[in-house]
Image (cartoon, rainbow, N blue to C red):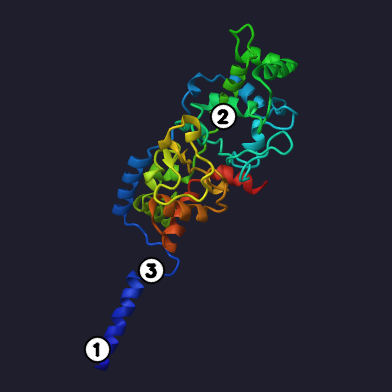
């Protein structure tokens, strides 16, 4: 009996030492499993292009003008706010990290969370409710919005910019074939041209291109869970989102029922609580989350979305791995820049 007991203990030791998983250690995918994951990911998400749609027509002069306008506070009613105020690309990840953003005028506040401007031009529409078709149309909105930059009308915007000699020269170079190049339409067009240069990539892009060392074992398992749990019901394509509308609370109602989402644009009953699916690139840096900015952490956001849109309670292992993968969608250069701010 003693020999049998010793043999049993030896067998258990062998199993634990050879095949057991240490606490906190991610199981390593086999080469075949990783190749299968790579194939699935390529099919579901594709590859993020190096240039945004429409950028083929953007000249250096137009981009230079757009960059200056992006940081121009005179586009607001009291010279206090620029595009960069809320979509900060210098010290933040194209956002302001606030639940909703204050406007130029005192006691004004936006009603929705500010999304990042990085990679925004790859999305199928702009704004949470899709009311703008592209970056140019989107750029016009905040300038005239009374709770944002609050300029009274297009003519006043043109008047202000026309009064600045430097802009008269820059517009003439950017629009050489136009007699009166300083128009509200051209202002928005130039800002959009600059925003089309804000392409941001990550370690995931290296992995999908064939560098298997670009992701950790835990991040690869996070991607596997991301697919298998059903996050890809909404978050697909190169941006991991940004390419369709979906109901906030597909399985269980979301607690905030005040914002009716796309319904405010279309007035169609079927569009109630429908929002553009958020893109997940750089999501680690763009907190707080959701259209109302109520989820403070990435872990909280993932748990809530799994529950209300998939009807699932994630295990701690699933949650930890998925969050680890989502952080692999961060642009390392952007993260490094923000780390030293």
Residue at image location 37% in from the left, 60% down from the top: 28
**Residue closest to the far bottom:** 1
Number of other residues with Cα within 10 Å of mark 3, as a class: few under 14, some 14 to 19, many 20 or more? few
Q: Residue at x 46, y 30 (%)?
A: 266
Image quarter for residue 78?
Answer: top right
What distance separates the C-alpha of mark 2 from that of mark 1? 72 Å
- Which residue, given by chain and number where applicable, does mark 1 sit on? 4
Any part of residue 244 in sight: no
Check the picture and name the quadrant holding the N terminus.
bottom left
Nearer the N terminus, badge 2 or badge 1? 1
**Of the image marks 1 and 3, the number of the one nearer the N terminus:** 1
Circle 2/circle 1 CB separation < 8 Å: no
Residue 322 image point, x, y percent: 44, 54
Across and down, in percent, residue 80 comes to 74, 32
Q: Earlier in the sequence, mark 3 or mark 2?
A: 3
Q: Secondary structure at mark 3?
A: loop
Q: Which residue is mark 2?
A: 195
The kind of secondary structure element at disc 2 is helix
Q: Residue at x 31, y 74 (%)?
A: 15
Q: Which mark is residue 53?
A: none
Instruction: Give the residue at mark 3.
Output: 21
Residue 186: x, y in percent? 60, 17
In this view, the residue in front, 225 or 277, is 277
Q: Is residue 109 left or right of residue 129?
A: right
- Rounded to the nearest whole Å, what is the CA distance between mark 1 and mark 3? 26 Å
Task: Please report the residue visible at 32 percent of the width from the left and 57 percent of the height from the top.
Answer: 30
Q: Quadrant of residue 115?
A: top right
- In space, the residues marked 3 and 2 are separated at their CA atoms by 46 Å
């Amino acid at each position: 009996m003693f020999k049998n007991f010793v043999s049993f203990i030896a067998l258990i030791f062998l199993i634990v030492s050879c095949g057991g998983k240490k606490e906190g250690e991610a199981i390593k995918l086999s080469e075949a499993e990783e190749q299968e994951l790579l194939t699935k990911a390529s099919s579901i998400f594709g590859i993020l292009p190096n240039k945004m749609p429409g950028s083929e027509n953007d000249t250096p002069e137009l981009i230079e003008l757009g960059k200056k306008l992006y940081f121009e506070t005179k586009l607001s009613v009291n010279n206090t706010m620029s595009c960069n105020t809320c979509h900060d690309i210098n010290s933040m990840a194209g956002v302001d990290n606030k639940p909703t953003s204050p406007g130029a005028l005192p006691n004004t506040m936006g009603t929705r969370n500010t999304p990042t401007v990085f990679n925004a031009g790859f999305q199928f529409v702009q704004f949470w409710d899709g009311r703008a078709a592209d970056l140019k149309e989107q750029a016009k909105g905040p300038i005239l919005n009374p709770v944002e930059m609050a300029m009274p009308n297009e003519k006043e915007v043109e008047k202000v910019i026309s009064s600045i000699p430097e802009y008269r020269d820059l517009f003439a170079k950017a629009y050489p074939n136009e007699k009166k190049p300083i128009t509200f339409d051209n202002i928005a067009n130039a800002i959009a041209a600059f925003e089309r240069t804000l392409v941001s990539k990550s370690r995931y892009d290296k992995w999908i291109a064939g560098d298997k060392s670009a992701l950790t074992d835990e991040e690869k398992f996070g991607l596997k869970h991301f697919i298998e749990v059903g996050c890809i019901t909404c978050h697909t394509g190169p941006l991991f989102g940004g390419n369709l509308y979906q109901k906030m609370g597909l399985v269980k109602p979301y607690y905030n029922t005040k914002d009716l989402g796309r319904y405010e644009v279309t007035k169609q009953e079927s569009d109630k609580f429908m929002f553009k699916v958020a893109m997940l690139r750089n999501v680690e840096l763009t907190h707080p989350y959701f259209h109302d900015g109520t989820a403070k952490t990435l872990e909280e956001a993932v748990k809530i979305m799994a529950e209300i849109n998939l009807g699932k309670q994630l295990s701690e292992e699933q949650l930890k791995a998925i969050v680890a993968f989502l952080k692999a969608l961060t642009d390392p250069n952007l993260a490094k820049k923000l780390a030293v701010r």
